[in-house]
Amino acid sequence: MRYALSLTIAGTLLAQGCSALWLLPQARNFIYIVPDGFGPASQTMARDYVSLLQNGENPKAPVSMQLPADRMVIGNVRTQASDNLVTDSAAAATAFGCGVKTYNNAIAVDDDGQPVGSILEAAKGEGFKTGLVVTSTINHATPACYAAHVADRNSYEKIAEHEIGYSHPLGPQVDVLLGGGRCYFKPKSDPTSCRKDDIDLFGYAKGKGYRVMQDRKAFDELKKGTAKAADLPYIGLFNDDQMMYEIDRKLQPEKEPSLLEMVETALTSLDRATKWSFRGYFLMIEASRIDHAGHSNDPVGHLHEVIMYNDVMKFVREWIDKHPDTMMLSAADHECGGLTLNGFNPLPLKDATMTTEHAERLWKAYNGTDRTAYLKSTILPGYGLGNLNDTEVNTIISNNNLASDLSSRISKKAGVNWSTGGHTASDITLYGYGSGWRGGNLKADMAGNWDNTEIPGYIEGILKVKMSKVTEKLRKAGSAWVGKRDLNSHGHLHEH
Ligand SMILES: *[C@@H]1O[C@H](CO)[C@@H](O)[C@H](O)[C@H]1NC(C)=O
Ligand SMILES: *[C@@H]1O[C@H](CO)[C@@H](O)[C@H](O)[C@H]1NC(C)=O
Ligand SMILES: *[C@@H]1O[C@H](CO)[C@@H](O)[C@H](O)[C@H]1NC(C)=O
Ligand SMILES: [Zn+2]
């Protein structure tokens, strides 16, 4: 009898133990990385470039190195939207951020314009800390889908309000916001504002306890996330518009931090803030501007943004090795530019020290009297085209279309072709990393081909959170607050 009783108790304990284990999160922290507009050929371009530089620059020598992301390939992802085989970033991020297939332009709302909860909001609701670190404007489509809900991605002012909690039904959801888009957080009385109203979102954020940073100097006070100043929550926006492309940022590093610096800071402060709690953090990182360079068909910008993405992947992998209760997945939202590498030799790209965006900025700012001389002495060599002859220089002047003239000339030199200035339907690569048994589980669970909507369900299982709980709460607030769908607009397939 006693024996039987103890057996029963043991059995119950065992059963409970197992179910308790089942309910336990597999990891405390999850990092999701989006290289926006990054297709398979983007990685090939960067890998061949880096390995040729390391290989005596001989295009005929065999090359077989891996970039950091290459070491973490686990599958690939289908990307189509509900209304188009070619997705935009909004429908894509609603898919991998909220698990719902929707129309191009939709920011975390479904096909019926009803709000859907994101994985970030689900984590926040369960006591996790959360972060968004991007190089686009913070209210651009990808970060928006994690903490805003609007029927039309162009509602940038509304998205900024949601992201900081000003008009989000659940209040502030994001503890760390780093990126561009500063002008949307300033009232229209400020000459650098891009709002049409007097709402002062930086002021609101301060009232909610956020530290507000608007330049690199304030960012440096966080001391890579180790300083008291890096206590959560904080928002740092370093450019009124998109942040600078990495290669352009390097020309004036005192102006803005790099994506890598922001990632290190965010991770260190999120880690400090959750050190003693059962719940960790969810962080979304976006290498946003790979896409923008794809839209401009600018191989120089594209290349250096992809290299930065790989630098971030390397940093995060090493971070996870030191913090093994953390897991990571990474996948683009879609390919951009229809990049192909026929007649490929990336070496001509090495002479470029700026993107076409920066070249155009200089060109517009030039106020001297000899534009041709300026083009020859500064712009062309800066973009790696220092040896054009006078006929070609004059053609560029008379075309009056500097950015596209530059990018098409260097693309030709490097044997790079673009089939579009928009997105394509191509599948994109899925990367992931976990340390030890977690890495083994991640590969066993996620190897293969996925629809983009299936991604966040995996993260739900790891962290033991539920997006449907958030959806339910959001819908209690009705749906008028998400605004109306613009039926004449089909997403930014040909813009950013
Ligand atoms: C011309 O450009 C230079 C260099 O950007 C600048 O310092 C200067 O103020 C400009 N001059 C005028 C008259 O705009
Ligand atoms: C300038 O370069 C173009 C393209 O390489 C070539 O076709 C043209 O003949 C050159 N013109 C002169 C005057 O050298
Ligand atoms: C692609 O690149 C090759 C080699 O530079 C060039 O001859 C061809 O015209 C390009 N095709 C397109 C569609 O731009
Ligand atoms: Zn795009």
Image: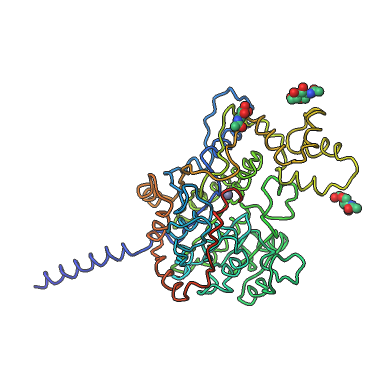
The x, y position of residue 397, in whole percent, is 80, 37
Residue drawn at x 65%, y 63% as measured from the top left: 236
Spot the residue most to the left.
1
Q: In which quarter of the view is residue 420 placed?
A: top right
The x, y position of residue 179, in whole percent, is 63, 59
Spot the residue most to the front.
488
Image quarter where the N terminus lies is bottom left
Relative to 202, 361 lies left or right: right
Spot the residue most to the bottom.
207
Judged from the image, the quadrant occupied by ligand 3 is top right
Relative to 293, 467 lies left or right: left
Residue closer to the observer: 132 or 254: 132
Residue closer to the observer: 36 or 61: 36
Residue drawn at x 43%, y 46% as measured from the top left: 77
Residue 343 visible: yes
The x, y position of residue 91, in whole percent, is 49, 55
- Vertical comparison of 480 with 264: above or below: below
Q: In which quarter of the view is residue 388 placed?
A: top right
Relative to 115, 153 lies left or right: right
Residue closer to the observer: 105 or 328: 105
Residue closer to the observer: 82 or 96: 82
Spot the residue most to the right.
369
The x, y position of residue 154, in whole percent, is 60, 61
Residue 55 visible: no
